[in-house]
Amino acid sequence: MIRGAAFDIDGTLLDSTGVWDGLGVRYLASRGVQAEPGLEERLFALTLDEGVAYLREHYGLAQSAGQVRRGISAVLEGFYRKEVRLKPGAGSLVRALRDAGVRMVLTTAGDPVLGRAALARLGIWDCFERLLSCDALATTKAEPTIYRMAADALGLAPREVLVVEDTLQALRCAHEAGFPTCAVEDEASVADRPAIRGLADAYLRDFTGADKVMEGLGENR
């Protein structure tokens, strides 16, 4: 019986993964610099420090490495606090689950402060009992720790907690730990779509079918 749910934030509730692809372009634009075509492909293969070094050297930025990192962080924060939107139907589903008595927590490998700010602005933060952060727990979503802690926080067994995620790695980890899983399609995981479909207990293109999800939960409660 499904009595609780653990929702991922980025790429699942929030349509946010695209900002990472355009972060270098956004930062340069904030400095009045036009990015060359192909910049994001170039940055994709680099670490943050390597990317910062590349931007400084290739574009002749006068800012120090620390200033560039802080500038990138400011661009990212502005996106979460002012721009990012929910995936279609996410708000309706979360509110419907809350009203049906399904207890919910959040799990994130991203920045918990920015995630909270975005969900509060978008009106669904108060639907969740707790936010669990991989960084705070010194874990990743390649390990079941965060999902087990989500179940513990809800006082439920893993089989009673639906894990809602967008990446193959996270879904596989939750599945192997005994959690029912629901996959939400995201552009960053398109290449893994066949494997995700084969693994997850449910697969959603977005949350606009909230009523059908609720019916399914109702049958299992």
Image (spheres, rainbow, N blue to C red):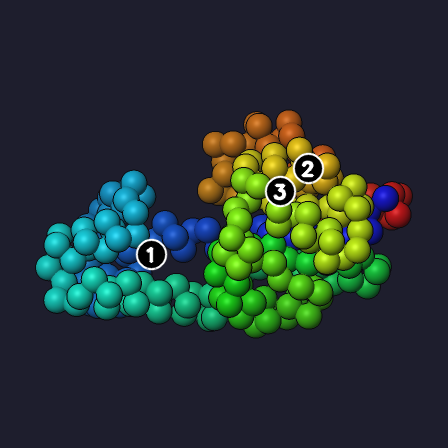
Above or below, comparing residue 41 to residue 92 in the picture: above
Report which quarter residue 52 is drawn in: bottom left
Of callouts 2 and 3, which one flags the residue occurring earlier in the amino acid sequence? 3
Q: CA distance from mark 1 to mark 3?
A: 30 Å
| Residue type, label 1 | Leu
Q: Residue 12: x and y, percent?
A: 58, 50
Mark 1 and mark 3 lie on one chain; the one further toward the N terminus is: 1
Q: Amino acid at mark 2?
A: Ala
Q: Is residue 51 left or right of residue 209?
A: left
Residue 43 can be seen in this image: yes
Residue drawn at (25%, 43%) of the image: 42
The quadrant in which residue 88 appears is bottom right
SS for callout 2:
loop
Circles 2, 3 touching at the beta carbon (< 8 Å): yes
Whether residue 96 sits left or right of residue 167 in the image: it is right
The residue sitting at 86% across, 44% down in the picture is: 1
Side of 163 relative to 117 (left or right): right
Q: Residue at x 43, y 51 (%)?
A: 18
Looking at the picture, how far across and down is residue 81, in whole percent? 47, 70
Q: Are marks 1 and 3 in contact (CB under 8 Å)?
A: no
* Left or right side of 46 for 152: right
Mark drawn on residue 177 = 2
Residue in front for this viewpoint, 181 or 154: 154
Relative height, residue 143 to residue 95 (above, below): above
Mark 2 vs mark 1, CA separation in Å: 34 Å
Residue 133 percent across, percent down from the top left: 56, 57
Numbered badge on residue 23: 1
- Residue located beneath label 3 in the image: 144
Q: Which residue is drawn at the image coordinates 82% and 43% (left, top)?
A: 216
State which mark lies toward you, 2 or 1.
2
